[in-house]
Amino acid sequence: MRKLGFFVLFFGFFWLAMDQIDTLVTSNSWPLVTENLDALSKTRPACNSTQACYSAEEIEKYTHKVIRSAYEDKPLYIIPGAFMLFGGILLALSSRKMKSNVIAKEMAGGNRG
């Protein structure tokens, strides 16, 4: 049971670490922003020669779209955290055989000289 506890604990930690590394290495935030900015620039022609005109509703719509996409793209940390918690509980509840045998011998008077 102790080996299972260690395995589950390390599995959860490994999963969490890989999710974090994947998030750092392949951040999908920038493509989301540029994709929506491109869509926004195609929807409205320029008002004058230097600036394009957008309504507050258009800006709000694309901002919420980017935020929602970024939120949905983040990894879910509750599952590997649950694995780590379960592994820790298994380790806490499992007894260490070597220590319990030594204590049992001392209580029985096995080390009297």
Image: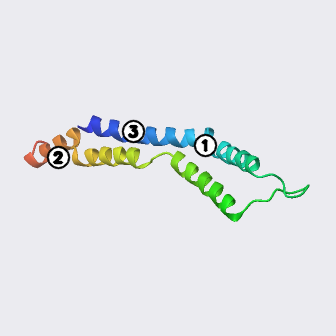
Mark 3–mark 2 CB contact (< 8 Å): no
User: Three-letter amino acid code at disc 2?
Assistant: Ile
Q: Is residue 59 above or below residue 96?
A: below
Q: Picture coordinates of residue 85 (x, y %)?
A: 33, 49
Label 3 secondary element: helix
User: Three-letter amino acid code at disc 3?
Assistant: Phe
Residue at far right of view: 49
Q: Nearer the viewer, residue 64 or 56?
A: 56
User: Three-letter amino acid code at disc 1?
Assistant: Leu
Q: Quadrant of residue 34?
A: top right
Residue at far left of view: 108
Q: Quadrant of residue 38?
A: top right
Label 2 secondary element: helix
- Separation (CA) of disc 1 from disc 3: 21 Å
Q: Which residue is mark 2?
A: 103
Label 1 secondary element: helix
Q: Residues within 10 Å of mark 1 (few under 14, many from 20)?
A: few
Q: Which mark is residue 10?
A: 3
Of mark 1 and mark 3, the one earlier in the sequence is 3
Horizontal side of 21 relative to 13 (left or right) equals right
